Amino acid sequence: MILTKNSLRYRTGILSTLLLMLPLLGACSEVKRIYEERTMSVYESETFNWGVQVGLSSMIITKGEEADNYLKDAQGQLLRRWFGYSNDLWGGGTPMGGVEEDNRLPKYLGVKYYEVVENKFYKLTDAVLPQQRIYDLFRQKKVEDFSGKVKPKYNQIKISILPKGLVWVFVDGLADVREVGLYQAKELFGMTVAQFNQFEGINGQKLGI
């Protein structure tokens, strides 16, 4: 292809125009973000004080990469993450899974894990939670018998990670548990133990698998 002076000037002009538009494009994305914030449903934007419980079968291992085990809000912002193996062993960074703090309620769930007995790897990416149902449950109140105080009936998201790629989600609270979703993770074909173990595990050591 032969570039003439005119075609070169034309392409240079387009490039210059695009460069000049970059700040404007950035401003547009900020306007879009603000618009989305202001048009969010109340169940997407209201905050609650809540934590996470993650239950693993005795032969399941999850890793701590932020992109693998997470809860995110309706805008895709990270709310919680975790890793561990069997018996609810916690690890990871901030915001770690078990911490109770004020946040929006989760809409997206992600999990990646190894099932030792099956010798299989599973991954669930951006599973959509019934956010409005969770919101309706979290708004419920209960009077404690021993103190007479009115407290939220639910304040935990409970995630049970099971064999066969099943991920079961509940809300939990004052002596009451309600199921909100059952999800099927996809098997990661071709994944090996060595690949799964290439990142540092709990306490900076490789996991013994």
Image: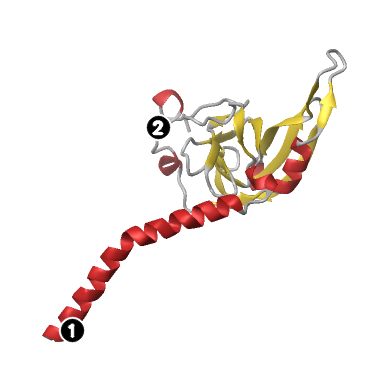
**134 or 44, which lies in front?**
44
Q: Work out how far the residue at label 2 is from the one at label 1, CA to CA, in angstroms.
A: 53 Å
What residue is disc 1 on? 7
What residue is disc 2 on? 200
Which residue type carries mark 1? Answer: Ser
Q: Quadrant of the N terminus?
A: bottom left
Residue at 65 percent of width and 47 percent of height? 44
> Going by the picture, which residue comes out furthest to the right?
145
Q: Earlier in the sequence, mark 2 or mark 1?
A: 1
Q: Is residue 185 visible?
A: no
Horizontal and vertical percent for residue 191?
47, 49
Give the structural element (helix, strand or loop) at label 1: helix
Horizontal and vertical percent for residue 89?
57, 25
Q: Nearer the viewer, mark 2 or mark 1?
A: 1
Residue at 50 percent of width and 57 percent of height? 32
Residue at 78 percent of width and 38 percent of height? 137
Q: Is residue 114 above or below residue 13?
A: above
Q: Quadrant of residue 194?
A: top left
